[in-house]
Amino acid sequence: MLPRLLLAGSTAALIAAAPAHELPGKGEPPITALTQRSGGPIDPDQAIERFDHADLRFVVKPANEEIDGIATLTFTARAPMSKLVVDLDRNLGPQAVAIDGKPLPRSAWDNPEGRLTIALPRPVAAGGKVVARITYGGQPHVAVHAPWDDGAVWSKTPDGRTWFATTDEGYGCDLFWPCLDFPTGEPGSVDLHITVPKGLKAPSNGVLEGIDTLPDGRTTWNWHVDHPNTYAIALNVAPYEVLHATYHSRYGNDIPMYYWYLPGEEKQAKALFAEFAPTLDFYETLIGPYPFGNEKMGVVETPHLGMEHQTINAYGNHYRKTPSGFDEIFQHEFGHEWFGNQLTAANWDDYWLHEGVEEYMQPLYGLWREGQARYDAMMLDQRNRIENKVPLVRGKVITEEEVYEPSKGGPGQDIYYKGAWMLHTLRNLIGDKDFYAATRLEVYGRPDPRPGNFSPRYGSTDEFIADVNKVTGKDYTWFFNVYLRQAALPKLIETRDGDRVTFTWQVPAGLPFPMPIEVQVNDRIEKLAMADGSGTLTVPAGAHVVADPEDKVLKYSQAIVDYQAWEKAQRAKD
Ligand SMILES: [Zn+2]
């Protein structure tokens, strides 16, 4: 997902054609508080359901802005089960339910608030299987400002044809299909069968297993994907054109690359497509193998800015150019294949593992392509956006919105920018070799990933800290306690007494913070260990002294605080 700041200037494409009176408006139909929630504490009835497989049939009906679905879900009971509980927006029914092939009477299920409870015809013992066939459908909730809120995005191509997409990272998969709406609710695999009107295409997750043409000219697109993220399953419908090539990985495997784009944009599409291979090479070199090389690298043009849908990344950045020379939205969303889809935070409290790491990948790509100056420029731009109001990690099981939304008490955009600057500081502290080794260990769960020897996994902040400590052989818990678990930044206090200059870390809650710093004294750089949180230098009389001249350490800045306050006041005047 993207920082909300990018909302400005990106909304033009979101404006759908004027709806007829029977079509839902933005934000309609309303959804319950339960459907809006994604993640948080897991319902005990759902915790015992191991989600093995989902077979999802979708019929997309743009004329009515409707979706009909038949979901056949296979679960294994981790403990005895007498009911099956899945999440599904109550606006979509269901209309019928069958268990193990036998239709149930209407009295056997209930979906008052968006959590569908199905009484099983007979109890299932631990280790037993349940196959539920759920027939549902209707007008799915329409997004207001996708991708910052979620739902269906019904739009039109410039020549007036259907252009449809879905997003649900915030509200969750239950907007479109019956699912387990928490990060560890990933099904083992999913088969998708997406039926669309004649002349339209439906690129989606994983591998295309075939396209069936119906007698009336509609087509059904059959896809198979392994281990998708819960919010990864995405419908994309338009009269797309497609670019295709094969990437020869440094790991020896061949990866098919696809870009589905709107007709009439071939020139821009080819320019973006040319970025795919070098971007893959960057991530594969610094982090490790592309996690879904046996499926595809897929990108699809969408009427919203972007989202990291697994193997079918949403792209809607209008081919924007920036001084960095690469498409930062594409590069960001695609990097979520590693940080978000391969490595998934088991709890949204650890959201920075997706967004902080991924936001840091744009300056690192600037460094890779151009060198230090581009990296510095991109980092300094991010630095001005860090707010430090709420800790990045709070040590409790919380929902997506309780992190992403400041109005719900979350750190909001700090998961991006403060996360990136924390990692910048860590990389300077432990060095490139250990930084990338720890990151690799967290992403793959092993130090030596190769295609075929790993699969998508769940991670956490605590695990990442353990990875850093393991790789470095030192205990850096103090570092994370300050940057992740405190809202305020450490402040470097400088005092000068004659020829002595003393630096002291002032840290929230008085926590230990032995963060070394560099100090420029006239034309020399001195290193201060700061082992007990302070250090003193003897300098020539009248020496010019600059602390941390290369800005290697994230720390309090009065200038940035003043700048942000001034900006806010200016905005209030406008
Ligand atoms: Zn993101």
Image (cartoon, grey):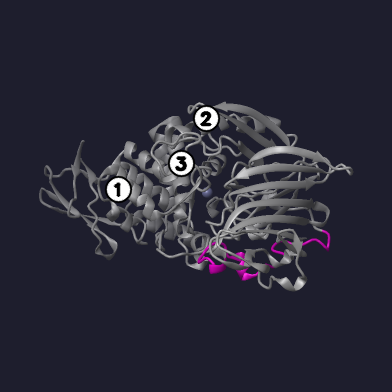
Please tell me whether mark 1 or mark 2 is closer to you in this view.
1
Residue 41 visible (yes or no): yes
Please tell me whether mark 3 or mark 1 is closer to you in this view.
1
Between the C-alphas of marks 1 and 2, the distance is: 32 Å
Q: Nearer the viewer, residue 147 or 517?
A: 147
Report the span colored magenta.
20-45
Quadrant of res 150: bottom right
| Residue annotated with mark 3 | 361
User: SS of the residue at dot 2?
Assistant: helix
User: Which image quarter holds the C terminus?
Assistant: bottom right
Q: Identify the amino acid type marked 1.
A: Asn
User: SS of the residue at dot 1?
Assistant: helix
Q: Identify the amino acid type marked 2.
A: Pro
User: SS of the residue at dot 3?
Assistant: helix
Residue 384 visible (yes or no): no
Which mark sits nearer the N-terminus, 3 or 1?
3
User: Tag on residue 278?
Assistant: 2
